[in-house]
Amino acid sequence: MDKIDELLTRGVANIYPSKEALERVLRSGKKLRLYQGFDPSGIQLHIGHMTGLKKLRQWQELGHEVIFLIGDGTGQAGDPSGKKRAREKYLSNKELRENARDYVLQAGKIVDFKGKNPAKILYNGDWLNKLTLVDILDIASHFSLQQMEERDMFVERKKRGEPINLREFLYPLLQGYDSVAMQVDLELGGEDQTFNMLCGRSLVKDYLHKEKFVITTPLLTDSSGNKIGKTEGNVIALTAPPNDFYGMIMSLGDDVIVKCFEYLTDLPMEEIKKIEKKIASGENPMTFKKKLAFTLTAMLNSDDATINAQEEFEEWYKKEKHRKV
């Protein structure tokens, strides 16, 4: 596959309005302005973020304008995506900015902030905190209560009798307005962000009278089907010490090996398909998990640190194996 085909297929769940429409634009040679947002509700980016970061890097390498957006504005509303109940605490703009202090440093392990086509760093609090009451009412007028209520997590909460904070209703409107404020052509985000991103697609059409594409990336889940991230408490932080990071990758279920290679690495898809076939045919997945752990650790750390992490794990594994015997 060529670079555009790989961009639109590898680590991609869905494209709105369609892959064909976006591909036509890209093959025409047009360069797009696109972004992904990261709400700093915690201080660490983790491997669940790597899928999006890798996609941003791909867009950069093809010459498109990439924005790394820090959601210190949207974060004040609290994203309800994937949340089974309302938040107990909402962070202030000051707290969110403090959390985001090292985000660029962490993301910079994958996204290029200094090269020939550096990613731009923006904070949506810079425009969201300046919206007037009339501005917010106007944004809200583009959506209906029925549209907001259709969200999966809200439907489930109502069934369980869980409260739905009206503050959460505002979140997709604020995220949607980001696309208008930045006048983007495309937004990138996880599948759990689909509703929010499609709200932005609607607002871009209404305010700017143009197309906004949306690309959703598949969520990285563990062997139990749970998303790997801070909400579920199974974070593998990009800043974790190399030895710990290597060990945490090795602790992942065997069924995520292929997905991690596809979503998080640059290993050619031909090789990944071979690995998938070998695992399916009964070959020991430990060999491939070690390759994955080494590859990911090396992406985020020095060669020496990666080799040391590998050696430490091997030593620990031998001791554990001997102890069990």
Image: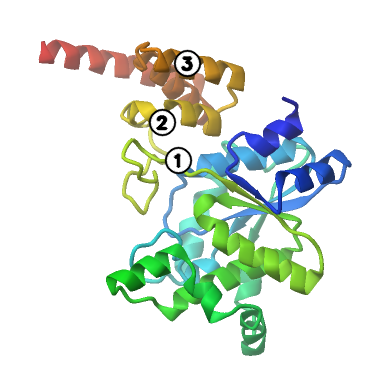
Mark 3 touches mark 2? (CB < 8 Å): no
Q: Residue at x 31, y 49 (%)?
A: 233
**Which residue is pictured at 48% across the width and 44% down the height?**
219
Residue 256 got which mark? 2
Q: Is residue 137 above or below residue 191?
A: below
Q: Residue at x 22, y 11 (%)?
A: 318
* Residue 2 circle label: none
N-terminal-most mark, 3 or 2: 2
Q: Which residue is mark 1?
A: 220
**Mark 2: few, some, or many residues within 10 Å (few <14, many ≥20)?**
some
Amino acid marked by disc 2:
Val
As drawn, is 132 to the left or to the right of 61?
Answer: left
Mark 3 or mark 2, whichever is nearer to me: 3
Q: Which residue is mark 3?
A: 277
Q: First in sequence: mark 3 or mark 1?
A: 1
Q: Position of residue 66 (x, y in %)?
A: 71, 48
Which mark lies nearer to you, 3 or 1? 3
- The answer to whether marks 1 and 2 mark residues whose Cβ atoms lie closer than 8 Å is yes
In the displayed structure, does residue 268 sit left or right of residue 44?
A: right
Determine whether the residue tagged by mark 2 lies in a helix, strand or loop.
helix
Screen quadrant of the N terminus: top right
Q: Is residue 277 above or below residue 46?
A: above
Q: Nearer the viewer, residue 141 or 120?
A: 141
**Element assignment for label 3:** helix
Q: How is the image coloured?
A: rainbow
